[in-house]
Amino acid sequence: MSDFSNHKFGTRAIHAGAEPDPSTGAIMTPIFQTSTFTQEYPGKHKGYAYARGKNPTREALQKNIASLEKGKYCLCFSSGMGSIDAIIKMLRPGDEVITGDDLYGGSYRMFTKVFANFGITFHFIDMTNASNIESYMNTNTKLIWVETPTNPTMQIIDIAACSKIAKAHKIMLAVDNTFASPYLQNPLALGADIVMHSVTKYLGGHSDVVMGALVMDDDKIYEQLAFIHNSCGATPGPMDSFLVMRGIKTLHLRMERHCFNGRKIAEFLKNHPKIEKVYWPGFPEHPNHEIAKKQMRDFGGMISIVLKDKNVENTFKLASSFKVFSLAESLGGVESLINHPATMTHASIPKAEREKAGVVDNLLRLSVGVEDIEDLIDDLKQALG
Ligand SMILES: *Cc1c(COP(=O)(O)O)cnc(C)c1O
């Protein structure tokens, strides 16, 4: 197996984990569409016994994603939520988790509606000031769960500062790196113990697969998570693994364009008379811009806007009037999407909680795709006009 660990990002995206097939020379990793593998003698096989535990197509993808995050191990799951579920299953009743107050709606729902019933306590706090974390820390605290940039208000949480606190208390730090992708941010290098991705988004990149991934360096954390992965079984199939491998080969090219288009659109929206506020971490006046500059390579294509008009019907009308942007949940694909978080991605968060976090009814979130920038700006102009 060639080692691409010293190569640059684009080369790793294309080559890491993707060895030509030894039996045929096929340059693409085959889709090993099989549930089981024959054994010569009980227990004597070629390293694969049953596909929940190990499948060669998934293995190739896992090596690739590990390489993009510069981590030792990767485990892929059948969804992003499946991968977060595995992390929380490392905990015990009585344990506590400190996390942010502007989380992906599905994470908030799983923490409060599923794992709270198993005796795990979650503290949802303002993490933009890392010293807030200390005041929630006690001997039961086992995990700090960070999402940055946050969804949808694009706060930036200082990963290195969170890691310092986690290390001082000998607890784990896990980072949901979905919004940044490994192209913009590598949490392990900033001291995180586990990086999580909804592979569904930028890694897959083509809105055709739902998948999750965890990347880690620590042998013990890997052993525990690999055990949960195989025991609980939220593992993805080989066809999806193949599609994601193909998607990742252009991750660096797509991310460059997402960032370029994102910047142009953020600047256009900032000066638009119908817009009250634009959330994008690339603006020098963004309250966490300095941290964003320190821990990210660029600022991405995720932007949220608050309209001056507070009338929710008018917000709905606007969201439905685009011709290039599509009204849909999700993000990170090649096509531009617009989303109304209050009724779509964040509907599972109670209104009062939501509004406290700034997710008001007149907020819209854009996932800027990789189309031609002139067409995207024209579409915004006609929809806002
Ligand atoms: C989509 C998303 C998830 C959940 O991932 P799925 O693949 O949809 O299960 C978690 N975190 C963030 C930030 C997301 O955008």
Image (cartoon, rainbow, N blue to C red):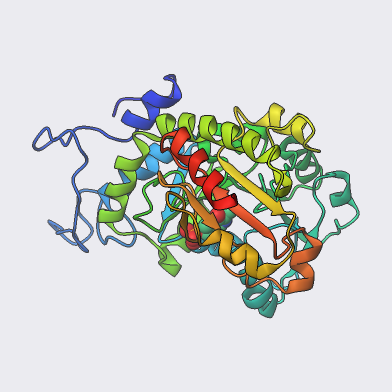
Task: Determine the residue located farthest toward the front in the rendered image.
Answer: 385
Query: x, y (%) of residue 85?
Result: 55, 65
Q: Can residue 145 be seen in this view?
A: no
Query: In the picture, residue 285 is in which quadrant?
Result: top right
Task: Determine the residue located farthest toward the left in the rendered image.
Answer: 24
Residue under the image location 75 percent in, 38 percent down: 158
Q: Which of 148 and 298 is in front in this view?
A: 298
Q: Nearer the viewer, residue 324 or 44?
A: 324
Count of number-bearing discs: 0
Q: Nearer the viewer, residue 39 or 95?
A: 95
Residue under the image location 86 percent in, 59 percent down: 138
Vertical position of residue 242 compared to residue 123: above or below: above
Q: Which of 200 and 269 is in front in this view?
A: 269
Vertical position of residue 81 compared to residue 212: above or below: below
Task: Determine the residue located farthest toward the bottom in the rendered image.
Answer: 117
Query: x, y (%) of residue 81?
Result: 52, 63
Query: In the picture, residue 262 is in which quadrant?
Result: top right
Q: Can residue 337 be seen in this view?
A: yes
Q: In which quarter of the image is the N terminus?
A: top left
Residue under the image location 58 percent in, 37 percent down: 265
Query: x, y (%) of residue 224?
Result: 53, 56
Query: x, y (%) of residue 140?
Result: 80, 63
Residue under the image location 42 percent in, 65 percent down: 234
Vertical position of residue 39 compared to residue 285: above or below: below
